[in-house]
Image: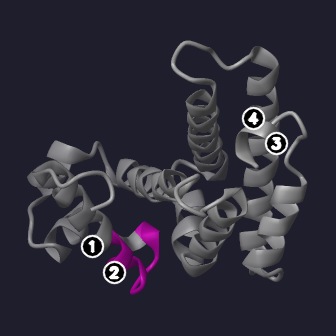
Amino acid sequence: MKDGNSKSQRTKEAFGDSYRRLLSEKPASKITVADIAKGCGMTAPTFYNHFKDKHALIVWIYINDSSCFMNNFNSDDYNWKDTLLDALEYYSANCRFVIDALAHVNGRSEFMSIMEEVNIGLLMNEIEKKLGPEKRVPKDIAEFVKLYCLGTVRYTYDWLIEGCTISPEKVAELFEEGLPYRLRPYLL
């Protein structure tokens, strides 16, 4: 389980898995909440107990999956480049899901904003861990996090739309090399 083993988490994961299966069969615009619920043997009311709508499920899937990469960061020999590479391989392997999410979560700009917000939050959490509980992330460091995430999300979007013509390994290398020097002590 990605975020624990609670019944609620397992139910959300079942809806997410159902949505992904359906997405391999038809476009997101043709998938209904009833389809998603039926695909995992549940009902639409159960779906609505966990998600406001289909778009909320798509966002949850992205947040849940993204959190997995960051949870591995700094464990054993898993470093920043490994984190980037895993994320980019995920995007490449789930290209249709991400592109459909960009198109169907109230528009591309909203989903990109969600991606940026999630990525900023994940990086800020990592920096906070390095600083310790008694210190806050300095404002200038927070601004560099924002700048870096805005750039990497936009680049990732373009990379996906263009068909992932550069390997995930090369993009991870670019993202690692493009990390602002002020963030390097926290992430490298």
Looking at the rendering, the stretch of residues picked out in magenta corresponds to 19-29
* Whole-percent x, y for residue 106 in the image: 53, 48
**Crowding near the residue tagged with mark 2, few <14, some 14–19, many ≥20 C-alpha atoms within 10 Å:** some
Compute the Cα span from label 4 to label 1. 34 Å
Compute the Cα span from label 2 to label 3. 39 Å
State the residue at coordinates (69%, 56%).
80
180 in magenta: no
- The mark tally for this picture is 4
Q: Which mark is residue 184?
A: 3
Q: Amino acid at mark 1?
A: Ser
SS of the residue under disc 4: helix
Q: Amino acid at mark 4?
A: Val
SS of the residue under disc 2: helix
Vertical side of 120 occupied by 12: above or below: below
Vertical side of 28 occupied by 132: above or below: above
Residues tagged 2 and 4 counted as in contact (Cβ below 8 A): no
Q: Nearer the viewer, residue 88 or 133?
A: 133
Q: Which mark is residue 145?
A: 4
Compute the Cα span from label 4 to label 3. 11 Å
Q: Nearer the viewer, mark 4 or mark 3?
A: 3
Residues tagged 1 and 2 counted as in contact (Cβ below 8 A): yes
Lateral position of residue 78 relative to residue 164, left or right:
left
Q: Nearer the viewer, residue 178 or 109?
A: 178
Compute the Cα span from label 1 to label 3. 39 Å
Q: Amino acid at mark 2?
A: Arg
Q: Which mark is residue 21?
A: 2
Compute the Cα span from label 1 to label 2. 5 Å
